[in-house]
Amino acid sequence: QYWTSVFNTLSIISNRETPHHRDHMSIAECFDILTTVGNYSNAWMTMPNLQLEFKYNSGCMIAFSGRIVRHGVYDVEGDRIAWAWYMRDAVHIYAGVPSCGWA
């Protein structure tokens, strides 16, 4: 009956490079939270439109608006799993729940 997270969508990415992109289905006003774990080395989260690069070590969490900020992760050596928690308006509309608006 009740959803146990403030986020309504979860993607799990395993051992995959994610080319630079924006998440056009996400809500711009909400932060996405990405978490990565595994036995790997030399991972970087890049945000080219902000001219930022972050070392993306195992256990790292990054929060940003995936709809506004272009982002990507290059291929790494080893095993990596990432969780991406984010919001989609279509789920709010389906459930009859108002969107969150700007934080």
Image (tube, rainbow, N blue to C red):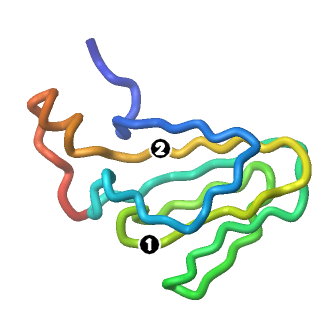
The quarter in which the C terminus is drawn is bottom left
Q: Is residue 33 above or below residue 20?
A: above
| Res 47 quadrant in image | bottom right
Label 2 to label 1: alpha-carbon separation:
15 Å
Query: Would you say the residues marked 2 and 1 are in contact, meaning their CB atoms lie under 8 Å apart?
Result: no
Is residue 42 rendered to the left or right of residue 24? right
Nearest-to-viewer mark from 2 and 1? 1
Residue at image mark 1: 69
Q: Please provide percent x and percent y for residue 100.
A: 20, 51
| SS at badge 2 | strand
Q: Dot 1: within a 10 Å radius of its alpha carbon, few (fewer than 14), some, or many (20 or more) residues?
A: some
Q: Is residue 67 above or below residue 97?
A: below
Residue at image mark 2: 85
Q: Residue furthest top?
A: 1
Which amino acid type corresponds to the residue marked 1 in the rendered image? Val
Is residue 68 rendered to the left or right of residue 92? right
